[in-house]
């Protein structure tokens, strides 16, 4: 009888230890990444989001920026940012034609939408993970009913065919540390 009770307690202790281990840094998964990214606004400073030609036109219609004009280069146009665009936390003029899609810089706190998490791997330091994700940035304006896609960085330059990489850090729980450039 005593042996059964001791074995039962041993199993309880082992089970509790397994439960506690699952609540630590080993519980990192795509669902947790999704919840962390969407859980609180994130400060983005000098990141770029892509637009469509229709969104550029809508921004002109609602006085977020001026109509695009030629910069002297046949391929490149610029739409000068207006105060209404700055109020939405756009940080610079809209650039059109020098990349596949129009794009604009953003600065400030934004809600993110984790649209697709494509990979995660060990980070550069202990207790860190690097996550590549297709992420949308929410802009509260009728021109932007869908989140705008955040551009990634390759070799130090923003590119539209690569998703951003985020550094997550474990310190008594997982948090998103920053975007890696």
Image: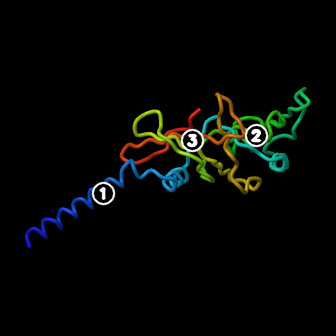
Point 60% across, 52% down: residue: 114
Which label lies toward us, 3 or 1? 1
Point 13% across, 70% down: residue: 4
Point 65% across, 32% down: residue: 154
**Residue 77: % across, % down:** 86, 34
Q: Are marks 1 and 2 in contact (CB under 8 Å)?
A: no
According to the picture, the residue beneath numbered tag 2 turns out to be: 103
Which label lies toward us, 2 or 3? 2
Disc 3 to disc 1, how far (Cα)?
A: 36 Å
Disc 2 to disc 3, how far (Cα)?
A: 19 Å
In the depicted view, which residue is nearer to us: 21 or 108? 21
Q: Earlier in the sequence, mark 2 or mark 3?
A: 3
Horizontally, residue 162 falls left or right of residue 129, namely right
**Residue 38: % across, % down:** 55, 53
Q: Is residue 147 above or below residue 151?
A: below
Q: Dot 1 lies on which element?
A: helix
Disc 1 to disc 2, how far (Cα)?
A: 48 Å
Mark 1 Cα shell of 10 Å, populated few (<14), some (14-19), many (≥20): few
In the depicted view, which residue is nearer to us: 32 or 54? 32
Q: Which mark is residue 43?
A: 3
Horizontally, residue 140 falls left or right of residue 109, namely right
In the depicted view, which residue is nearer to us: 42 or 35? 35
User: Which residue appears farthest toward the left when viewing the image?
Assistant: 2
Quadrant housing the N terminus: bottom left
Q: Dot 2 lies on which element?
A: strand
According to the picture, the residue beneath numbered tag 1 turns out to be: 18
Q: Which mark is residue 9?
A: none
Q: Dot 3 lies on which element?
A: strand
Q: Earlier in the sequence, mark 1 or mark 2?
A: 1
Horizontally, residue 11 falls left or right of residue 132, namely left
């Amino acid at each position: 009888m005593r042996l059964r009770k001791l074995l039962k307690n041993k199993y309880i202790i082992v089970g509790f230890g397994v439960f506690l281990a699952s609540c630590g840094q080993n519980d990192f998964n795509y669902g947790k990444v999704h919840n962390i990214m969407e859980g609180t606004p994130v400060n983005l400073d000098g990141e770029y989001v892509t637009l469509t030609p229709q969104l550029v036109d809508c921004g002109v219609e609602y006085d977020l920026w001026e109509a695009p004009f030629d910069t002297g280069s046949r391929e490149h146009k610029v739409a000068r940012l207006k105060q209404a665009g700055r109020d939405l936390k756009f940080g610079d003029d809209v650039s059109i034609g020098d990349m596949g899609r129009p794009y604009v810089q953003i600065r400030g706190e934004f809600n993110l939408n984790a649209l697709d998490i494509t990979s995660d791997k060990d980070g550069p330091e202990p207790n860190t993970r690097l996550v590549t994700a297709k992420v949308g940035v929410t802009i509260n304006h009728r021109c932007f009913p869908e989140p705008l896609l955040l551009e990634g960085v390759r070799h130090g330059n923003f590119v539209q065919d690569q998703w951003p990489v985020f550094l997550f850090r474990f310190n008594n729980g997982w948090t998103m540390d920053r975007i890696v450039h």
